[in-house]
Image (tube, helix red, strand yellow):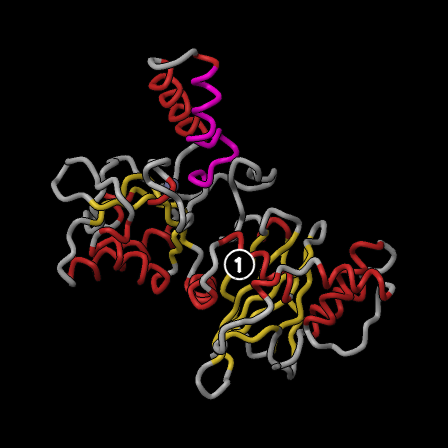
């Protein structure tokens, strides 16, 4: 194994005093192959090791736990910046934290001059997501696939609230209003808990005719959908809920999230969705993708969030890609090697 992150070890050592954290720290040291366990009684270490999910114990050949050894640079990232990162987990259980600024977004139709087929004329996206989406749609079109259509991008809290009201209204024609309101909340995330309030979220569907209804099956049922599932990571997008059933959910199977090419590639190589990837990062501390000769290509490192800022020690030659809160008390830094 290509050894552990100095930064992770240092951060781990600082976690003295609290039992559970110390045990986790000890586990982290074991996982990273540090050899000497500094924290936790043997029982705590054994308990922590037993709690480790078995499916993550082996990594693909292209991925190594930890960071390459060598000279390091120290990087301090403010909490304010981490809150603008691309890995913020937002769903019915993880609301958008205080301190996240309203995203800066652009008109999809206007900004890319119609090169992205767009059902919602008002659709907005953050700049990085929009440029990556444009590249993906243009490549698909050049391959003869003209049916990819953006159905939704970034929404304001008010738009999200109206969507929830609309869903409640629709359901209330078939059931009591209280029932409808409760059911609607399982279908549309309430404002403050909606991933579509981030600048990175895009619903992409297959539409055979202009202004017609989109296909309602699984993405893998069509050539364009299969292409999207196989290639979105190359543009920095992930399918947010790859296993969602279109028969039960009209939205999640088509929901994509821009996380950037570093994270998307690591998720592609490990075959994990966002939740699984964040769990793997917490378990391993750091992940490094290596080329055929074993040279590092890119890495992601996970650290517990500090109050005002978080300090990382990363390889000196690393070039920063993104720094993000994950919204579960941890942060993730991603970078490439020139
Ligand atoms: Zn969506």
The residue located at (25%, 53%) in the rendering is 225
Majority secondary structure of the magenta segment?
A: helix
Q: Nearer the viewer, residue 216 or 262?
A: 216
* On screen, residue 98 above or below 158: below
Left or right position of 167 against 40: left
Q: Is residue 180 magenta?
A: yes
Q: Residue furthest top?
A: 176
Q: Nearer the viewer, residue 4 or 241?
A: 241
- Residue 97 image offset from top left, x and y in percent: 59, 40
- The residue segment tinted magenta is 179-197
The residue located at (78%, 56%) in the rendering is 21
- Residue 198 image offset from top left, x and y in percent: 45, 43
Q: Quadrant of ligand 1?
A: top left
Q: Is residue 116 magenta?
A: no
The residue located at (28%, 50%) in the rendering is 219
Mark 1 vs ligand 1: CB under 8 Å? no
Left or right position of 32 against 147: right
The residue located at (33%, 45%) in the rendering is 254
Q: Nearer the viewer, residue 210 or 76?
A: 210
Tell me if mark 1 has few (under 14), some (14-19) or many (20+) residues whose alpha carbon lies within 10 angstroms of its own: some
Residue 184: image quadrant is top left
* On screen, residue 272 above or below 74: above
- Residue 336 image offset from top left, x and y in percent: 49, 73
In what quadrant of the picture does the N terminus appear? bottom right
Q: Residue furthest bottom?
A: 293
């Amino acid at each position: 194994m290509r050894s552990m992150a100095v930064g992770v070890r240092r951060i781990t050592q600082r976690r003295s005093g609290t039992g559970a954290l110390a045990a986790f720290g000890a586990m982290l040291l074991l996982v990273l192959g540090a050899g000497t366990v500094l924290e936790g009684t043997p029982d705590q270490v054994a308990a922590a090791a037993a709690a480790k999910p078995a499916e993550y114990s082996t990594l693909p050949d292209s991925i190594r736990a930890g960071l390459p050894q060598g000279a390091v640079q120290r990087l301090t990232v403010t909490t304010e910046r981490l809150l603008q990162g691309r890995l913020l987990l937002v769903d019915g259980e993880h609301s958008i934290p205080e301190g996240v600024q309203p995203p800066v977004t652009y008109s999809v139709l206007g900004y890319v001059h119609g090169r992205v087929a767009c059902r919602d004329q008002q659709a907005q996206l953050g700049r990085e997501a929009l440029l990556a989406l444009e590249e993906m749609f243009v490549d698909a079109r050049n391959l003869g696939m003209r049916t990819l259509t953006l159905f939704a991008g970034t929404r304001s809290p008010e738009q999200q609230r109206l969507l929830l009201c609309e869903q409640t209204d629709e359901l209330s024609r078939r059931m009591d209003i209280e029932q409808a309101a409760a059911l609607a909340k399982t279908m549309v995330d309430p404002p403050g808990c909606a991933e579509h309030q981030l600048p990175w979220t895009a619903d992409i569907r297959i539409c055979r005719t202009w202004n017609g209804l989109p296909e309602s099956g699984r993405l893998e049922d069509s050539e364009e959908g299969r292409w999207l599932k196989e290639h979105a990571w190359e543009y920095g997008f992930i399918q947010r809920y790859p296993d969602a059933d279109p028969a039960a959910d009209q939205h999640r199977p088509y929901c994509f999230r821009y996380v950037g090419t570093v994270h998307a590639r690591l998720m592609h190589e490990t075959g994990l969705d966002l939740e699984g990837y964040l769990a793997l990062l917490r378990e391993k501390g750091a992940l490094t993708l290596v080329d055929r000769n074993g040279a590092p290509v890119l890495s992601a490192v996970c650290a517990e969030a500090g109050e005002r800022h978080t300090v990382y020690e990363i390889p000196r030659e690393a070039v920063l890609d993104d720094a993000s809160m994950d919204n579960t008390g941890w942060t993730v830094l991603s970078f490439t090697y020139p």
